[in-house]
Amino acid sequence: MSEAKRQDERVRTRNPLQAALSRPSAGAIIATIIAFLVFTWPLWECVGDAQACTANGFLTPRGISNWLEVAAQVGILAAAVTLLMIGGEFDLSVGSMIGAAGMVLALSIAEFGLDPWMAALVAFGFALVIGALNGWLVTRTGLPSFIVTLGMLFLLRGATIGITRLLTDRTQVGGLREFTDGDMFVQFFAGDLIIGDFSISASVFWWVLVTVVAWWVLTRTTFGNWIFGTGGNATAARNVGVPVRGVKISLFMATAASAALLACIQVFTVASADVLRGEQKELEAIAASVIGGTLLTGGYGSPIGAFFGALMLGMTKVGIPLASIPAEWYFAVLGIVLLVGVLLSNWVRRRGTGVRS
Amino acid sequence: MTTATNPVAESATSSDVPLIEARSLTKYFGNVIAIQDISLEVRAGEVVCLLGDNGAGKSTLIKTLSGVHPPDSGEIVLSGESVHLASPRDALHRGIATVYQDLAMCPLMSVSRNFFLGNEPTKGWGPFKRFDNEAADRIALEEMHRMGIDLRNTSQAVGTLSGGERQSVAIARAVHFGAKVVILDEPTSALGVKEAAIVLRYIVAAQARGLGVILITHNVNHAYPVGERFVILDRGQQIGTFEKEELPREELLKLMGGGAELDKLSHELEEYAAEVEQKGLGNSDVGTPVS
């Protein structure tokens, strides 16, 4: 069969570079390399002089662990958000979900005396129910998911603050250390792996794991094909028997679960929960997905791209203050990167897939 | 889902019992009579054309036949057995595949992913059960070749295909998944002359493989070369059913009413274009370039 393919004179052989550029993740990988070069730029002259290389801290073991961890926090969300966006929907409520699930976790431990693993189970259960509710509302009402989850964003944040105040009179729950210290289960979320000078936090491993799972599901399973179909053309998918509603509801549950995972990591790491945790994380996750080549209109995207999108955001967030640029410029830079990233991946997609409009 | 499906071939010879038969189908929408008392039958290896102007009831009829609307009266008989079609999915399982004009494909997905959407081939088991990419590519390419569709590469996005090629992917998919009757909803209406000819060729190929084909169109020029029987609808009523022998093309054009006028217009335009070309009056942005 490949013989026949090769002989077909209508198939242009593309050079490997062009073929690589046709992947949705190409733009994000390029952006990541550019970000890396930009933030290590002051260090280039130091080749051979180890002391100078670590001058601004970006390439020190600590610096690397630092931006990896920041990237991981966005990346865990972005992997799930990417699948949802490929499935043609949005979830703005993940940011509030981080605060809400974290508070459910902390309150379950501190107020209700549950074991950490049981509390984590409750937090995940809570997130899955809210995720399913999001999905149910979107598929039932036919309202844009942007609106439904925007409502859920406010509702969750408000309810989290209100209920926490009612129960504890405060907006933070701290002092979890006495419940979680020495707990093996907690180490899965809060532990660090020490390799030489590097101390890699558990979140980085979760990030890689979630990305690999998302990639596997999307490209190697039947469900992945349904996700593409649901986002690419819901009517066509329904006509050939894809359970479009079920796919969407599962994806909303997945994004909520990713928020709960991040909440567990945060709460166990700092041993406290704050009702305001996760603010704007939903937008960063969407930004990482979009930089990673995922289309807002659905049907196209890549968890690998989202991985690099998140990595780039992490580098930028940590690199800016290290490069002596005031940290408040992060969002301005993020905005520029987002716009350039989208333009780049749009261009790449048009060149790469050759899809006629 | 099994991948080797071709139950069609053996039934091709026993063409006495119609594969699908509509008996006095009637469908109302509120007080609107969408179709009334429509009957038709399709045998294996037959192409039946459903002709009529906009609003004639063609869409309602095919939606009834494909399980979207239950009929208010009348019955649908498949291979001699009266059935109730619960849903499009149900109709599909019973071998009635409908290819809609533009609702069939996801443009950014590859040809083989589109081909197997909803019926993915898998390998492995348990948590390692996965979408079999190689099998999908191979089967899609084979199936397309069997239909005489010379596809370039099944990993390319469907959006890169022309309109006619997209239609043919949808037809090949329907055939592969065991369709005995393929209903084509205006497959040629959005296509250029050459593209339409390609699709018509695939229809003949499907017919040769022993399928029953219902072709919906309002273009007599497309219907006449491939059709063996013509069912003409107007304002929800069945004007008549004609065998090709008893109905010269001109007669069919007359029966079509509005269609005839359009056709006349298209001939006039063709003549005009030829005239322009002949006299060399064509300015550069009209008509085809002359070498």
Image (cartoon, coloured by chain):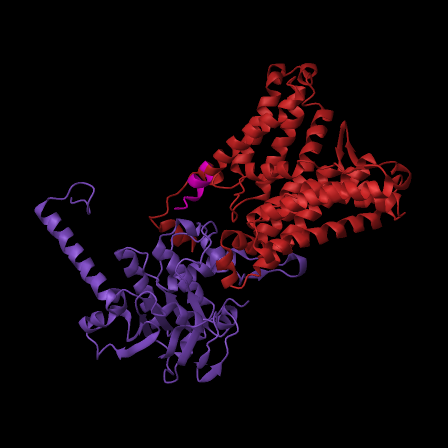
Q: Residue at x 63, y 54 (%)?
A: A137
Give, as a single range, the part of the protein colored magenta: A347-357
Q: Residue furthest front?
A: B31
Q: Is residue A109 left or right of residue A59?
A: right
Chain in red?
A
Q: Is residue B190 left or right of residue A260?
A: left
Residue B8 screen position, x and y as percent: 42, 75
Q: Residue at x 70, y 15 (%)?
A: A51
In magenta segment, residue A119: no
In magenta segment, residue A350: yes
Residue A213 screen position, x and y as percent: 65, 48
Q: Quadrant of residue B171?
A: bottom left
Q: Residue at x 64, y 16 (%)?
A: A48
Q: Is residue A330 left or right of residue B169?
A: right
The answer to whether A74 is drawn above or below residue B268 in the figure is above
Chain in purple?
B
Q: Nearer the viewer, residue A132 or A290?
A: A132
> Which is the main secondary structure of the residues drawn in magenta?
helix
Q: Can residue A34 be seen in the rendering of this structure?
A: yes
Q: Residue at x 23, y 61 (%)?
A: B262
The answer to whether A330 is drawn above or below residue A122 in the figure is above
